């Protein structure tokens, strides 16, 4: 016959237990009521403690409904915690697997990236070497240009100094030229006035300055022409009659060409 247990909050039922009935009757107990829920909790707690401690001995504790309930509650919380830990472990394993896949992908992508970076680095180094060579050439050209610029500046200073000197000389010559022009005009007017005075006094036109200059030029031309003839006639001077005749002829020709004017 099943009857309600005194532990009504645990929803237990009491039933007669034949093995425990005799000891309890010796103590004056009229009957035995066993709570099956309490027995189930006790068995569950015992199994849980054995699982927890393993080969180690289980510590002794007072077996009563309260301790059994507390241990059962702890076992339930432990079970829930183990379940959560198991889920966390599975999640971590899944994430580790995903991370390993990503690592493999990144590693496979890393090798070409390293090759590309190495190629870019080599290209950059080559470009830097070319830039260094160009920079060295530019520095050399710049040095030569600076030297040339310095030489040009010195030449420019010398040219400016020479230009100043030449300008002063040209200015001096221009002043002298102006002075000479003025004097020339003055002399020209004086010569013209003198010629007018001489013409008024009845002077022959052949004795004028221009006529004398023309005769002087004509005489110089005749001397130039007779110089070869003189050299040619030197070979005939040994012949006395011929030399006298030639001399007489030459003098006569000279008198005919240059008649003696009035004094």
Image: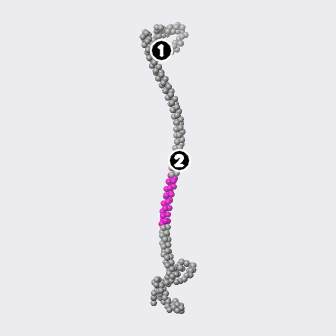
Q: Which of marks 2 and 1 is nearer the N terminus?
A: 2
Q: Is residue 104 magenta?
A: yes
Q: How far across and down, in percent of the image, does residue 213 sit?
A: 46, 15
Q: Position of residue 23 (x, y in %)?
A: 53, 90
**Can I make out residue 242 in this image?**
no
**Which residue appears at 49% of the width and 88% of the height?**
33
User: What are the residue bounds of the magenta stretch?
Assistant: 97-123
User: Which residue appears farthest toward the right when viewing the image?
Assistant: 56
Q: Residue 36 carries which label?
A: none
Q: Which residue is drawn at 51% across and 47% down?
A: 131
Seen from the viewer's position, the closer of residues 9 and 86 is: 9
Q: Give me the residue at 47% from left, 21% from top.
A: 180
Mark seen at residue 132: 2
Q: Relative to the observer, which residue lies in front, 139 or 227? A: 139
Q: In this view, does 29 lie above or below 243?
A: below
Identify the residue position indicated by label 1 in the image. Answer: 216
Magenta stretch prevailing secondary structure: helix
SS class, disc 2: helix
Secondary-structure class at tag 1: helix
The front one of 245 and 207 is 207
Give the distance between the C-alpha atoms of the residues marked 2 and 1, in whole angstroms: 82 Å
Q: Which quarter of the image is occupied by the N terminus?
A: bottom left
Eyeballing the image, is 36 above or below 177? below
């Amino acid at each position: 016959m099943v009857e309600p247990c005194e532990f009504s909050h645990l929803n237990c039922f009491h039933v007669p237990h034949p093995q425990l009935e005799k000891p309890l009757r010796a103590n004056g107990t009229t009957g035995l009521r066993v709570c099956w829920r309490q027995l189930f909790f006790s068995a569950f707690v015992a199994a849980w403690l054995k699982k927890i401690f393993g080969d180690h001995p289980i510590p002794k504790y007072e077996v009563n409904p309260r301790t059994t309930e507390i241990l059962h509650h702890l076992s339930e919380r432990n079970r829930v915690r183990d379940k959560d830990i198991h889920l966390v472990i599975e999640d971590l394993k899944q994430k580790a697997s995903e991370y390993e896949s990503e690592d493999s992908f990144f590693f496979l992508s890393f090798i070409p990236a390293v090759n590309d970076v190495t190629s870019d680095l080599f290209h950059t180094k080559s470009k830097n070497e070319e830039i260094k060579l160009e920079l060295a050439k530019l520095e050399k050209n710049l040095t030569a240009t600076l030297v040339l610029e310095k030489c040009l500046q010195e030449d420019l200073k010398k040219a400016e100094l020479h230009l100043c000197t030449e300008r002063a000389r040209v200015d001096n010559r221009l002043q002298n030229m102006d002075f000479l022009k003025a004097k020339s005009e003055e002399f020209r007017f004086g010569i013209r006035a003198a010629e007018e005075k001489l013409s008024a006094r009845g002077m022959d036109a052949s004795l004028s300055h221009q006529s004398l200059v023309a005769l002087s030029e004509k005489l110089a031309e005749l001397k130039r022409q007779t110089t070869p003839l003189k050299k040619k006639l030197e070979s005939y001077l040994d012949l006395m009659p011929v030399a006298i005749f030639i001399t007489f002829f030459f003098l006569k020709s000279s008198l005919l060409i240059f008649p003696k004017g009035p004094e």
